[in-house]
Image (cartoon, rainbow, N blue to C red):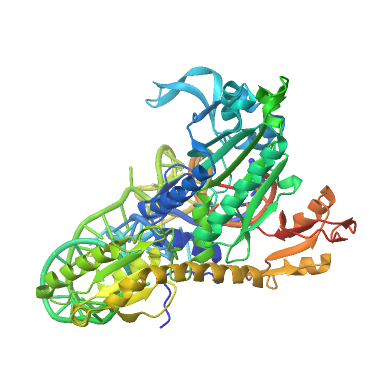
Amino acid sequence: MAKTGISPTRSEDYPGWYQQIVRSADLAENSPVRGCMVIKPWGYALWENMQAVLDEMFKETGHENAYFPLFIPKSFLEKEAEHVEGFAKECAVVTHHRLEPGPDGGLVPAGELEEPLIVRPTSETIIGHMFAKWIESYRDLPLKINQWCNVVRWEMRVRLFLRTAEFLWQEGHTAHATKEEALDETRLMLDVYAKFAEEYMAMPVVKGEKTEGERFPGADMTLSIEAMMQDRKALQAGTSHFLGQNFSKAQDIKFQNAEGGESYAWTTSWGVSTRLVGALIMTHSDDDGLVLPPRLAPKHVVICPVIRKEEERAEVMEYCASLAKELGGVQYDGKRVAVFVDDSDKRGGEKKWFHIKRGVPIRLEVGPRDIKNDSLFVGRRDQPKSFGMPRVEFVERVSEILEEMQQGLFDKALKLRVDNTQQIDSFEEFKSFFTAKNEAKPEVHGGFAECYFVDCPETDAMLVPLKVTPRCTPVDQDAESGICIFTGKPTQTRGIFAKSY
RNA sequence: CGGGGUGUAGCGCAGUCUGGCUAGCGCACCUGGUUUGGGACCAGGGGGUCGAAGGUUCGAAUCCUUUCACCCCGACCA
């Protein structure tokens, strides 16, 4: 019987499958607070690993961490017109600072604030305010700051990790003396994100620029990395914004230049969030549960002792402990192999499925028979069948196996994207590409469509009924000419279009 | 905020139309036993103010009114 670990399967009900993965892998669950999730230890460990790698990359590129307030005075948010409009509708507002017993025995807010405070949806305005104080001379530039924090956006519809009212992220904010330097920073951080996505998450991404309609409110240019999920929808996995002088002018971030004159700084901001966990899930996981790329897995190897009789216990446990110690001394990706012994009181099969669902890359089963032969029973998360291997060989090869799995996941994800990316030259073809054959129960369809287009309201209007959006115009493209499939106008821009999260 | 739907044990549900024994089932959980290189089997057991408030009635999970929450589809979005 081909029983899958997860029900429904991806092809039966993709969103349902996603929810089950999050649940079965014990990553997170809904909280009593609407739209806010509880990230459980296994999910948080994954996020911590992502943080550690990214943090190192930010520091290597000359950024420093700092922390700014959770609350932003309402007036700050009002300074940049587009910014206000972009975020106003989804802000949580603090209007009181105290609770008093009410007439019905409950508590009622009291002590109204003179100026309401907004729970940060992003921190451009408050960080910009501080930048204005810190920057006086061109010698104070560039200023390159990052903060790890939570933000709140009061979303209408939420899904664990992909869109929650509160989420964890990092936001980088930099100020530069010249436009060129700020543009370089914007591109550099997009490269950092792409490197992280591909080399650590094993998730291939397309780097590109957002169209005007998809741009960050207040930005002159937004760059993003876009990944294809297994249902062929696009997920924006990270953004890097060139803010021009919009925020510096709104917030008076100016400096005295080398010539003695006064100039406004050029600023950037960039961020990735816990959404990356969702991206990771939808890129690699299968119908048996979570699949983790080894480089980010909280644990690489789980050792499951097989004990049939009580009198075997001591010997088996001792062997497992020594094996764990030996494996822990092996290096993988610049760190120790993370290994643990699962001695929980579960039946063998149950224990095995527990770790499959949680995506532990390698399972080792160790029983008296294996001990006698000094061999191990090895289960790889990326292969359906387990196999025996001498202990010595496994210890020697474990690092290599993990790296092979890491690469395998990337290759598989890249193949999915390549196979489902199509160059499309007519609107008719475009429409059929994005229309399910069975409308009542739409099958997985579509993908990335590469098309010549002109970024204009007319184009956007034609996309609306198809529920397709321009994802980006890829940064590495040849400047060839073509005809916009929407408007028929000549153009040199080719974009990627897809349904998206 | 518009349109649709659902609230019954930790999870998934039946029962509601047509009011009537002590509110059920599967999974999970606990205990005992038999098993054990694989998501076991048998027996026993614990757990519910049927989303909330009010009403109708001899009697309400079921009918009526009000209300709250959540889910799906839109609009909005990392």
In the picture provided, is A415 more to the left or to the right than A406?
right
Residue in the foreground of this view, choosing between A119 and A195: A195
Assign the N terminus of chain A to one quadrant of the image: bottom left
Assign the C terminus of chain A to one quadrant of the image: bottom right
The residue most toward the front is A259
Give the vertical position of A385 relative to A89 (above or below). below
The residue most toward the left is A311
Q: What residue sits 41% from the left and 60% below the top?
A: A333
Q: Position of residue A73 (x, y in %)?
A: 56, 24
Q: Position of residue A264 (x, y in %)?
A: 70, 26
Q: Is residue A495 visible?
A: yes
Q: Position of residue A272 (x, y in %)?
A: 55, 47
In the picture provided, is A427 more to the left or to the right than A168?
right
Q: What residue sits 57% from the left and 51% below the top?
A: A193
Q: What residue sits 55% from the left and 57% below the top?
A: A197
The answer to which quarter of the image holds residue A399 is: bottom left
The answer to which quarter of the image holds residue A294 is: bottom left
Q: Position of residue B65 (x, y in %)?
A: 53, 42
In the picture provided, is B66 more to the left or to the right than B14?
right
In the picture provided, is A300 more to the left or to the right than B5?
left
Q: Is residue A252 visible?
A: no
- Count numbered badges in the picture: 0
Give the vertical position of B34 relative to A352 (above or below). below
Q: What residue sits 51% from the left and 45% below the top?
A: A60
